[in-house]
């Protein structure tokens, strides 16, 4: 039980008054950005990242990861009260959450959703506690080819698992890689893709891209829809909470199934959104009240919320153990690691045990803090959304601009942010996914250097990615993920044929 | 395309799709060409600087062509990318935001933000001018306290620093 000792050590690192205050501040800010249009987990963390440069890495990650928890929980508030999913993974929560709010049961829906979120996140954190150290240990034997094959797996599963057209996912991802290549080449020192503009020497920061694509893009989208929020009010008091809690244990089967789906899909990139839909679908099929789903069933709120928080949390597993983020927000946190001077990857467990175990301990505490804040402050957070959009929009643009500037004190970054905003708006409207672009931008340099080192080792022979069982099976898995839609289609055709032959 | 008579008119999704694929195609070609010029082959010390980006650019081109074919051969449905009225609202956010950013160079971020929020609220939100100014001032002042005073992160003051009279 070495993990438990390390975890206790982690708690001792985190449990200082300063860190606890940061934790509540982080959760509070996280729920606020989760509720506000135009701000979400990824760009909320990106905007606040520069403010943490002066903190110790542990305090910084405690605050930033708490922003993430807050945003994960907070998405449910807008879904249930306003029928506006704050994040893509809260879409499934609106199916039963909003009808419940319409019938005057918003308090019950919110309590169920927060409790379910907490359960999902907690299970995922427990999984991280025990699996991450083992995975990191295992990954210590990785060389450049293995690392490249893991990157390759990450990107292939995006293409294979994404809802969007594969060619669009590829374009979006490759634009991320191309942007990552701009600037000085680390190996040869040559300038790449700067076209003589000295401004481009610095390259593109993924933080600017995140703030623009998600923040400004979202504002443009909301403005286009001409949103006027009309929300339901929630009565939240101890009686409602306790009564809902009494009803919740009945759904233990649904919760467990959703948790497994969430943990499983969360480890693969972009998993939270499919996880929430899949959990909702499975719950609908297995529940006794399945046909009533969509009319305001408590169980229909529990299923997607357990799954998306389990997925959102377990997205941090590959980030901690391998240095490979599973979601845009995890990518921003990973970028933060590099800025604070830590080298992400499997060595982190050995070299920075205080940091890693502090982070894992803060996941437990942060989720408890989030649950408390969510249950007690819903009316306040809902009131934020009632602020008219013509006030919210310029204020968020200003906040984004400040965030973009402080990344590297460059005014040109604010222009890039605006351009990324327009790109984000157009891409979102045409179903180009944004997450692969951001992940490729973060991982581009690392993936490239792993690729080049592998090529050097093998003198340009691509067969190095199949040279031993380990790298070969990861690459094979990646190819399987890449061609999964085709393979699944093939199976479906075969099954249709065989059933036709039987009949 | 410019049928202003019907209520649902705007830029068609198909036109927007094709325009975006052409843009990404151009971008891919640019990346591939620049990487080729840089040395996309095996150099003296292994793969050259353009080795990796060259493939990236090429893949963007191939995927863009696939997208282009899919967009061009799709049945010309009536789906609309953005209606004119909605587009106007989008520009109503975009143009002031650009002016705000340009304003940062001249009068600094605090004053520019104040004016931007105030004018946006008065012009788009139809608020009385004193409310707009109050919110703008409040947000700017909060930012000022947070960055200049507490976190000691200096934000741009612009070429004509209006705040110099208070010593910042």
Image (cartoon, coloured by chain):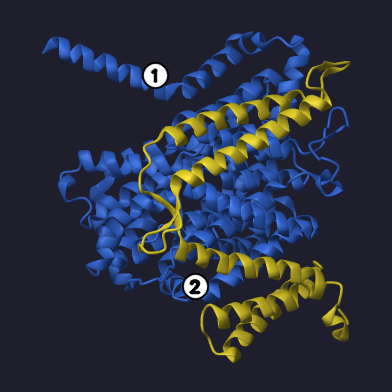
Chain identifier for the blue-coloured part of the image: A
Percent from the top left, x then y, of residue A106? 30, 67
A391 horizontally vs A456: left or right: left
Q: Is residue B100 above or below residue A428?
A: below
2 and 1 marks on the same chain: yes
- Between A248 and A151, the residue placed more toward the observer is A151
Q: Which residue is mark 1?
A: A487
Q: Residues within 10 Å of mark 1 (few under 14, many from 20)?
A: few
A236 horizontally vs A211: left or right: left
Q: CA distance from mark 2 to mark 1?
A: 46 Å
Residue in the image at 53% along x and 15% along y? A476
Q: Which residue is mark 2?
A: A389
Q: Which mark is residue A412?
A: none
**Residue lying at the far left of the rendered structure:** A503
Could you say which quadrant of the image residue B108 lies in? bottom right
Q: Secondary structure at mark 2?
A: helix
Dot 2 or dot 1: first in sequence order is: 2
Q: Secondary structure at mark 1?
A: helix
- The quadrant of the picture occupied by the C terminus of chain B is bottom right
Res. A344 in view: no
Q: Colour of chain B?
A: yellow
Residue in the image at 66% along x and 76% along y? B116
């Amino acid at each position: 039980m070495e993990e438990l000792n390390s975890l206790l050590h982690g708690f001792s690192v985190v449990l200082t008054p300063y860190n606890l205050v940061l934790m509540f501040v982080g959760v509070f800010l996280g729920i606020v950005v989760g509720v506000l249009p135009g701000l979400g987990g990824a760009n909320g963390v990106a905007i606040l990242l520069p403010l943490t440069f002066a903190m110790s890495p542990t305090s910084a990650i405690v605050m930033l990861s708490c922003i993430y928890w807050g945003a994960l929980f907070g998405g449910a508030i807008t879904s249930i009260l306003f029928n506006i999913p704050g994040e893509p993974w809260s879409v499934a929560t609106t199916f039963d959450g909003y009808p419940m709010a319409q019938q005057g049961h918003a308090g019950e829906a919110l309590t169920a959703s927060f409790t379910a979120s907490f359960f999902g996140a907690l299970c995922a954190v427990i999984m991280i506690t025990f699996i991450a150290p083992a995975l990191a240990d295992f990954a210590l034997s990785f060389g450049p080819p293995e690392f490249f094959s893991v990157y390759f797996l990450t990107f292939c599963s995006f293409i294979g698992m994404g809802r969007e057209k594969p060619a669009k996912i590829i374009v979006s991802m490759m634009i991320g890689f191309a942007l990552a290549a701009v600037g000085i080449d680390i190996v040869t020192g040559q300038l790449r893709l700067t076209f003589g503009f000295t401004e481009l020497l610095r390259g593109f920061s993924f933080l600017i891209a995140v703030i623009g694509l998600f923040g400004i893009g979202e504002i443009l989208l909301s403005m286009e829809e001409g949103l006027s929020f009309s929300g339901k009010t929630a009565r939240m008091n101890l009686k409602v909470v306790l009564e809902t809690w009494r009803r919740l244990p009945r759904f233990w089967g649904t919760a467990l199934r959703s948790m497994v789906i969430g943990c499983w899909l969360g480890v693969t990139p972009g998993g939270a959104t499919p996880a929430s839909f899949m959990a909702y679908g499975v719950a609908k099929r297995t529940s006794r009240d399945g046909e009533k789903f969509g009319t305001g069933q408590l169980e229909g709120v529990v299923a997607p919320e357990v799954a998306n928080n389990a997925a959102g949390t377990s997205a941090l597993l590959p980030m901690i153990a391998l240095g490979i983020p599973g979601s845009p927000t995890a990518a921003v946190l990973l970028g933060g690691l590099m800025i604070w001077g830590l080298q992400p990857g499997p060595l982190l467990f050995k070299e920075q045990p205080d940091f890693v175990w502090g982070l894992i301990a803060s996941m437990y505490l942060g989720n408890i803090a989030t649950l408390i804040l969510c249950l007690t402050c819903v009316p306040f957070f809902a009131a934020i959304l009632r602020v008219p959009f013509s006030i919210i929009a310029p204020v968020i643009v200003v906040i984004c601009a400040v965030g973009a500037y402080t990344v590297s004190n460059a005014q040109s970054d604010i222009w890039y942010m605006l351009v990324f905003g327009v790109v984000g708006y157009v891409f979102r409207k045409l179903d180009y996914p944004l997450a692969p672009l951001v992940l490729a931008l973060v991982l581009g340099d690392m993936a490239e250097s792993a690729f080049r080192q592998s090529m050097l080792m093998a003198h340009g022979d691509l067969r190095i990615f199949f040279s031993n069982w380990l790298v070969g099976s990861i690459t094979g898995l990646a190819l399987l993920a890449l061609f999964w839609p085709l393979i699944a289609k093939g199976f479906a055709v075969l099954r249709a044929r065989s059933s036709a032959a039987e009949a | 395309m410019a049928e202003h008579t019907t209520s649902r008119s705007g830029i068609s999704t198909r036109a927007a799709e094709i325009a975006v694929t052409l843009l990404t195609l151009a971008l891919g070609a640019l990346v591939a060409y620049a990487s080729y010029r840089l040395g996309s082959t095996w150099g003296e010390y292994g793969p050259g600087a353009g080795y990796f980006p060259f493939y990236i650019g090429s893949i963007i081109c191939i995927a863009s062509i696939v997208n282009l074919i899919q967009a061009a051969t799709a049945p010309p449905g009536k789906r609309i990318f953005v209606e004119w009225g909605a587009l106007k609202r989008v520009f109503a956010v975009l143009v002031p935001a650009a002016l705000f950013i340009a304003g940062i160079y001249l009068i600094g971020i605090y004053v520019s933000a104040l004016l931007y929020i105030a004018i946006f609220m008065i012009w788009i939100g139809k608020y009385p001018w004193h409310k707009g100014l109050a919110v703008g001032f409040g947000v700017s002042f909060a930012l000022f306290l947070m960055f200049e005073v507490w976190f000691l992160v200096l934000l741009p003051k612009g070429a004509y620093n209006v705040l110099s009279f208070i010593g910042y």
